Image (spheres, rainbow, N blue to C red):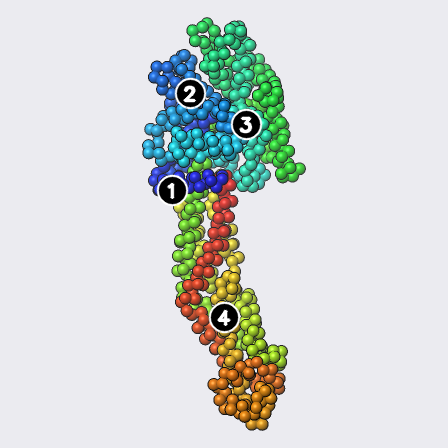
Amino acid sequence: MSQEKINQIQSIINELNDRTFEIIGFDLGHGKTALAKLVCSNTYSNNLEPAILKIQGQTHIMTALAYDQKTGNAVIGEQAFDLATENSADEFEICFKSRPSNQQAFPQEVIKNFVQEVKNQIKTQLVSSDGQAIFFVGCPSGWSNQEAELYKQILETCLGQGKVVVIKESRAAFIHACEIGNIQLEKLKEYLRQGILVIDIGSSTTDFTFVKDKKIKDLGSNEYDLGGSLIDKEILKHSITLNRDQEKLNIKLQNKRLRQICEIRCRTTKEHYFSLANKQNYQRRYVSSVTEILDDTNLEFSAKVNGEIIDRIISQPLEELGNRSWKNCFYRELIQIRQDLMNDNDEEFELNQILLTGGGANMGFIKEICKDVFPKGSLVLESDHEVCVAKGLARYGRYCIGVIGLKNEIAKFLDEDLEKLIKEQLSDTFWHELIKLLQEGLIEKSLIKNCLIAWRDGEIETLNSLNPYLVEKFSNRLREDKAKKIIRNKMNHLLNRIKKKVSNFSRGSFSELYQHQPVELELTLENIFNQLDRLEFDLFNPDQVNLLANIAGIFSGAIFAIGSGFLGWFAAVEPTNIALLAGILSWSVAQSVTALTNWSIDEHLQTLIKTANLPINLRQAFLSEDRMTTIVNNIRTDIKNQINQETMQPQAYISLNKQIINLIKTNLSGAINKEINEDDWLL
């Protein structure tokens, strides 16, 4: 389904604003018309099984329109046919569903008047009369998107602006077959992996649709409109040749109304023949319609078919099919489809499931050709072909609105509920506890001691160079598995709360909507939770969540302490070392004595000490084991204090919380939407 159509349905849902409404599946067929409905509250159906809307007391009616000579009123269905046979109709139209792109042949006003009268006759069966209905109307799969849009615009003039959604009929037939068990749900996943071919044989067209791996594709050349009505017309021609008044009948049937009456007799006779369980008894014996007396003449017409006539008709070239026979065209389409499927899959591809639907699906030769082209294909025949598309359209509407409603609820959950849930967990206490765990687990004495030894032994030239060295070592430690484990363990409580919420959400308000659906629409929690479990909270990555934005600043105090310690130690050594210090710092002895006397407040001296490449023997003399232990303990305490000062501020948490929320929301929404998008493939 295009985004434009999804937006259209979303607009309808918004307009309905939580009111009860109905989904109407409207199968306006070339030969027959049927409607089914589902009542919905908000975006959820109150019932799973569509109810047929009866017209004139019937589950389906003839697609026929007439105008009563006495009243001028539009009359539809069998009542229109009766008016026509009584010669009481000003006009009589049948088989008027055609491609909207052919504007000359497309009877726009006829369709509008027919649809308007259908709407008038179902009003009393609707819950509300204030337009709270969405009409899902079928069209052949062979129609282009532009043709479907033109069709929608025409229907909206009588069904309501923005209240019509046009759906490919093969999708409706497929979803109906799945839900009523014609395609077993327990085997559906296997069938979808292998592929299912849906063949919809209607009165005006024959459509081919292939469903595999949650992908749906319309097939066939659509070169000709291969419909069952072509066979009806040929039966009429053969029936005329069998009439004793053939010439007079031909002249009389130039009258459009009378010819259409006879075509309908031919259609019903054909349907009766193909419904016979003992067709072998009618290879030469005729199946005949009632005898029609044509107006005030003595001319009679009776449609006649048998096995030989049907074989002759389906095998003879037809001008409408490019001088190919009906049977040959159908066979050629299947051969090309088989080749296309082998090209798209592999040379060893074998189709295992074929769903036959539409009024012409029970024609015996259809099954024979399907078995010839796809010998391993299991044939599934829709049992209630008169109403299956109407019910399927209603089911499709429920499915469609449900998926969109589900997406809306998930969007609300991700935008509002999820953020609130995360904020509840990411309290100040949460961060204090996490920082404490990191301090205890990561600021190890051995790490600091090893850095000091590297400076003492000359691996690091100056105290200033020790700072980036410490930063690098500590930063690496923050990214090691131990740090990740500490963070993960702390974050798991939050993630488990989110999982519980999503689980309840998944099994909650929308789960009932999707039971018995042809696809598994409930969120696959394992996939979503795996995405969360793979989520790494790198709290020290500037590109993600930077808990310690100023690690260098944290260690600056440690460097200051080492420099001060060195000066303190140096001040206690023999005065003869003053000359040594003066040489190191390029100072006079007098400056050095003054500086050493005031070392605790001389920042300039501190700077010089930290930038000087002090002799290794002095470093080693300064950093005895006892002094190193004391310095390590002091530095560890100072680092903890510095981390607390930087991270224990409320404003720091506000920023951190936002980053964590965005991180979880992005990954969770991606996982959930991936699930939903995989499940809306029928749209």
Q: Amino acid at mark 4?
A: Asn
Q: Give the number of the disc on residue 65.
A: 2
Locate residue 72, reporting x and y percent: 36, 18
Q: Identify the residue at image location x=50%, y=47%.
A: 675
Label 3: element kind: strand
Residue 37 appears in which quarter of the rendering? top left
**Dot 3: few (<14), some (14–19), or many (≥20) neighbours within 10 Å?**
many
Q: Give the number of the disc on residue 206.
A: 3
Q: Identify the residue at image location x=60%, y=88%.
A: 583
Q: Nearer the viewer, residue 24 or 151?
A: 151
* 2 or 1: tag closer to the N-terminus: 1
* 4 or 1: tag closer to the N-terminus: 1
Locate residue 171, reporting x and y percent: 50, 34
Q: Is residue 663 above or below residue 25?
A: below
Q: Identify the residue at image location x=43%, y=9%.
A: 295
Q: Are marks 1 and 3 in contact (CB under 8 Å)?
A: no
Instruction: State left or right for residue 373 relative to residue 130.
Output: right
* Mark 1 lies on residue: 14
Q: Is residue 409 above or below residue 166?
A: below
Question: In 3D space, how far apart are the residues under numbered discs 2 and 1 (Cα atoms)?
Answer: 36 Å
